[in-house]
Each structure stands twice: as structure tokens, then as C-alpha cells.
Image (tube, rainbow, N blue to C red):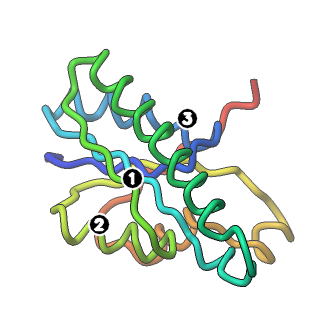
Amino acid sequence: MYDQILVPTDGSPAADAAIDHAIDLAKQYDARIHALYVVDGSAYSTLEAGSEIVVGALESEGEEATDRVAEAAADAGVEAVTSVVNGTAYRTISEYVDDNAIDLIVMGTHGRQGLDRYLLGSVTERVVRTADVPVLTVRENDE
């Protein structure tokens, strides 16, 4: 049913909550995990100096976050590939899905409720609304 499973990550505990679910599904279906970190440098483009430093730091953070996913997958005997790319998160995730024949997206949610959810929105919400493949959302543990 699933051959390619995407785990978008930002390195947060909410994103990390999705890793175990993705790995479990990958083991069941003998699927490959794709760990993706999107660097949205546009938020820092207005900085007169230092935007390259900020983007570089985000790319390093992305390498660490995707490596954590790959290590967890390897420990479970699941093949994994990692990617750190620049772009707008939800659009880049959608493009990655199309470019890599992804069958399922597994991603964390911060579990916002009420007014926060309507005012702030989220990458997860946009992906759920726009994805052409199933999206499994995993709520961050309160522990």
C-alpha cells in the first residue's frame, strides 16, 4: 500500500512525535522513509546583514533533524533518505511529494485549538488541505 513515506520535520517535539508512527508503517509495508526539512529563508531576507548566517544555521539544524529521523529508521531496519531544501514549507512539501512518488505523509501537529488555530494556521493544516496523498497527523505528547 505504501512504498514511500514522507516525514517532514522542523526538529520540534511535535515533528519528532511523528517519527515512530512513520517508521512503524514503513516496517509494516517495507517502505522507504523520506525525512524532509524545509528552510524558509524568505522570513530573513529583509535582514540587511547576516541573512546567509541565519539560513546557514537553519540548514545545519535541518541536517541534524533529518539525521535523527534517518538514525531512528536505521535502528529499526528501515531505509531512509534525507533532504534539506529551501522554499515555502507547505509548497515544498507538496513538490517533494510529486517529485518522489510519495504515498503517505506523516507529520506532527502542535495541537492548537480555538482562536490560535484560526489566526495562526499551520504548515500541517495547509498540507492536509492541499495534499494529493493521505496525511497522517500525530499530536505531540504532553509528557
Q: Nearer the viewer, residue 58 or 93?
A: 58
The amino acid at mark 1 is: Leu
Which residue in the structure is indicated by mark 3? 17
Q: Position of residue 34 (x, y in %)?
A: 29, 46
The residue mark sitting in front, 1 or 3, is: 1
Query: Closer to the camera, 60 or 83?
Result: 60
Mark 2 or mark 3, whichever is nearer to me = 2
Q: Are marks 1 and 3 in contact (CB under 8 Å)?
A: no
User: Of label 1 and label 3, which has the lower sequence position?
Assistant: 3
Residue type, mark 3 in image:
Ala
Residue found at x 31% / y 45%: 82
Which residue is under mark 1? Answer: 36
**Front residue (pair 125, 91):** 91
CA gap, disc 1 and disc 2: 9 Å
The residue located at (53%, 73%) in the rendering is: 126
> Is residue 121 in view from this perspective?
yes
How far is disc 1 from disc 3 in space, using C-alphas? 15 Å
Q: Is residue 45 left or right of residue 48?
A: left
Q: What is the three-letter code of the residue carrying label 2?
A: Tyr
**N-term mark: 2 or 3:** 3
Question: Can the viewer see residue 139 in this picture?
Answer: no
The picture places residue 138, in percent across and down from the top left corner, at: 54, 43
Place of residue 24 in the rendered image (x, y in percent of width and height, measured from the top left): 32, 27
Tags 1 and 2 touching, CB below 8 Å: yes
Residue lying furthest right: 115
- Mark 2 highlights which residue? 96
- Is residue 67 depicted above or below 129 in this figure? above
